[in-house]
Amino acid sequence: MKIKGLLILALISVCTFAQAQLTDYSIFDQKFNFYIANDLGRNGYYDQKPIAELMGTMGEEVSPEFVLATGDIHHFEGVRSVNDPLWMTNYELIYSHPELMIDWFPILGNHEYRGNTQAVLDYTNISRRWTMPDRYYTKRFEEEGTTIRIIWIDTTPLIDKYRKENDKYPDACKQDINKQLAWLDSVLANAKEDWIIVAGHHPIYAYTPKEESERMDMQKRIDPLLRKYKVDMYICGHIHNFQHIRVPESDIDYIVNSSASLARKVKPIEGTKFCSPEPGFSICSINKKELNLRMIDKKGNVLYTITRKK
C-alpha cells in the first residue's frame, strides 16, 4: 500500500507546476520562434481576451514568425460564411495587437466541421494574415541555416465517430482519408529538414474524458507514419489543457496545447511527463541544435519546457 501511495503521489506531481515568470527574453534571440494557439473562439470571454493581449505584448520581445493555430478557432458551430460576424468577435477584434498581425496558419477542428468548412479556407482571401491553402498542407521554413518543416493535417475526418454523424459534421464523411494519408506518407518520406513537426487538432495520446475511439483512430492511422519517419513532435489541441506525453518505443514528443480561452481539468496517464489545467499558449523556439517548446499560462509564467537536441 505504501508503494502504491508513493506511485500516486509521483503521478500527481507531474500535474503540478512551479510558476516561473518569463523575464529573460534573450532565450529567444537568434532562434526561429512561433506561437501555438488553439481552442480560441469564445467571443473574448473567459480568458480569451487577456491571453490574446498577453500574446501581443510578449510578441514585442519574442518576435514570433507566425501563429500555428491547431483548430477550434470558432466555438461552437463553426462559421456559416466568410462574412459571419464570428470572424470579428472570435478572431479579428480579439487578436488585434500589432504584434499579432503576422501569418496565422490554421487547421480545422471538430467545431469548424459543425459549420461551413470551405468558408474557413476561403477566409484566406479575405484576411491578409489568415493563411490556409488547403485542409491539410505543409510548409518549409529556414532561418540562418536551420530548416524546419511543419505539416498541418486534417484530423476530424480521420476519426470514425465524426464521419458517422452526418447531421452534426456534414463535411467529415466527404473527405478522402486514404488520399490524405498517402499525401502525409509522401511528404514525410521526402522531408529532409533539421526539424519535422506535425500538427493536428486531435491528440494521439492524452488524458481526456472524450471517447477513447478518437485516440485509437489516430493511433491506427497517424502514429505509424510519425514513428516510421521519426518525426520530432506532434502538436495538437482539443483537450483544453497542457500535456506532454512520451510512449514506449517512440522518440516523439506528443504535445497537447492548452485552450487560449477556457481550459479543463487534467490528470496524468501512463507516459505523462507533465500536465496542467491552466489556459494559455505555447512558444516554440528552434535553432540548428535545439528545439524548445515553452508552455505559457495566462499570466505569462513558463509552466514547463520541452527540449529536444540534435
Image (cartoon, helix red, strand yellow):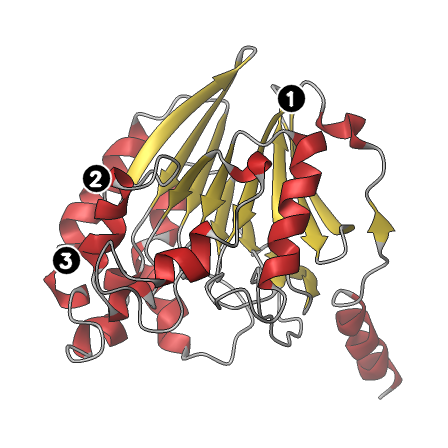
**Few, some or many residues within 10 Å of mark 2 (<14, 14–19, 20+):** some
Numbered label attached to residue 289: 1
- Identity of the residue drawn at 52% across and 49% down: 95
Instruction: Report x, y in % for residue 192.
Output: 40, 21
Q: Nearer the viewer, mark 3 or mark 1?
A: 3
| Chain-order first, disc 2 or disc 3 | 3
Disc on the earlier residue, 2 or 1: 2
Image side of residue 159 versus residue 56, left or right: left
Q: Are marks 2 and 3 in contact (CB under 8 Å)?
A: no
Q: Is residue 25 left or right of residue 238?
A: right
Q: Residue at x 57, y 59 (%)?
A: 260
Q: Residue at x 21, y 54 (%)?
A: 119
Q: Which residue is mark 3?
A: 175
Tell me: residue 59, above or below residue 161: above
Q: Please, what secondary structure does the residue beneath circle 3 have?
A: loop
Look at mark 2 in the image and give the residue it sits on. 183
User: Residue 282 location in percent, x, y?
Assistant: 62, 47
User: Residue 68's mark?
Assistant: none
